[in-house]
Amino acid sequence: MSKLRFLLFLILIVSVVPFSAENNNWPCFHGPKRDNLATEAGLMQAWPQDGPELLWTASGIGHGYSTVSIADNRIFTAGMIDKQTYVIALDMSGKKLWQKLNGQSWEAAEYQTWAVPYAGARGTPTVDGDTVYHLSELGRLTAFDVRTGDERWHIDIMETFKAERPEYGYSESVLIHGDALICSPAGEEGYIVALEKGTGRTLWANTDIKDPVGNCSAVIASIDDYQQLITLSAKRILSFDPNDGRLLWDYPFANKRENNVADIVVSSGLVYASTGYGKGSILLQPKRQADRKFSVKPIWTSELLDNHHGGVLLVDGFLYGAGHEARGWFCLDFKTGAKRWQTRGKGSLTYADGHLYCLDERGTMALVKVTPEKWDQVSSFRLPQGGKGLHWAHPVVCGGRLYVRHSDELYVYDIRKD
């Protein structure tokens, strides 16, 4: 190989690394570990005054709050178009590959509540191998072929498990665990269920819990060397055995609206939960007493960081997120609940390369250095004007890009370091 050809080869390798298959993988809501922490490096440590370069905008993806999943050089999201819910696949340049119907949207439901103006797709598609799964607001759970969008199977979880329509519609992003797909219909014949991911056949269904559905997405974690499936109903923190659905432990946790949305955070055998409407945060310590029997005690509670639905993440022993009635962005000590700092604002966030990416619900994106010492904002920019509703879809950092969805548009920014 000549020196010139070798140099060109090196340039090519360096240029494609940030978009490699390993880095360009965010297959489900909050990433492969559901901790909302991107592992890539080599990102910009500050942005130009007008923000990073906008690579492209995908329009016409439908209204909603579903964020993106990214796998195999494809981008997946969901949106409401003409009162129908669609799952949509894009290539890495924003070109639409396919758009497939997943039933009626929440806005088309034959009932009206004060919350109807917040209609639109909620759950984020989950990618596993050659299949992408999505649960619609009205409970249509569908498996699509990743490449073609062809439907492989679907079930109506409200009909199958005798569930009532949730007040806000289903918002869960389903979880894949081995050969099982796990979701929470909150029905008489299954509060939480595991389905065979290849067919939709029921593997197990827990009928012990009779609570209204929560709106969070379940996580898998090991506590005292015992793998657990942890989620929130509208009234409680719940832990199940993911192999058969048996309830391991539960703990009361309800806000005044019975609307728990933020995902659970688990670290060092401790379980953190947060919810809005003034309830706040709690840290629990489950302890294994015998086979499949656990005691649970609270370590601390706080009315701070009562997260509405923008998410809370844990970095180096500190919690970061936004409050609801306790207004502001917060940093709390994970082990003690002590407030380290608070500043104005409310929104959703993600983490990558030493920084928080904080999306204010009014449309300002901020790059904030992760530190428990202070709110250390490095840069910010305004998203393009347009669309309807607040900016509630969570941002995603993947493959050297920042993905921000608002209403029926997806904005994609280049955040690689030069």
Image (cartoon, grey):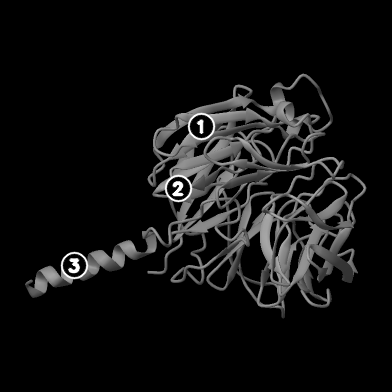
Residue, x 47% and y 41% (percent of image)? Answer: 131
Which numbered circle lies on residue 9?
3
Residue farthest toward the left in the current orientation of the protein: 2
Residue drawn 85% across and 65% down? 304
Residue that mark 1 sits on = 60
Q: Is residue 345 above or below residue 140?
A: below
Measuring from the top left, give residue 312's x and y in whole percent. Answer: 71, 61
Residue type marked 2:
Gly
Q: CA distance from mark 3 to mark 2?
A: 30 Å
Instruction: Report if residue 172 is visible in the image.
Output: no
For label 2, the residue is: 129
Instruction: Please report whichever mark, 3 or 1, sits nearer to the chain's N-terminal start.
Output: 3
Q: Residue at horizontal 46%, vertical 68%?
A: 43
Identify the residue shown where x is 56% and y is 52%: 178
- Label 1 neighbourhood size at 10 Å, few (<14), some (14-19), many (20+)? some
Observer-side mark, 2 or 1, equals: 2
User: Residue 384, image x and y in percent?
Assistant: 55, 45
Identify the mark nearer the N-term, 3 or 2.
Answer: 3
* Amino acid identity at mark 1: Gly
Q: Nearer the viewer, mark 3 or mark 1?
A: 3
Question: Total marks drawn?
Answer: 3
Choose the circle earlier in sequence order: 2 or 1.
Answer: 1
Secondary structure of the residue carrying tag 3 is: helix
Give the side of residue 311 with respect to residue 342, left or right: left
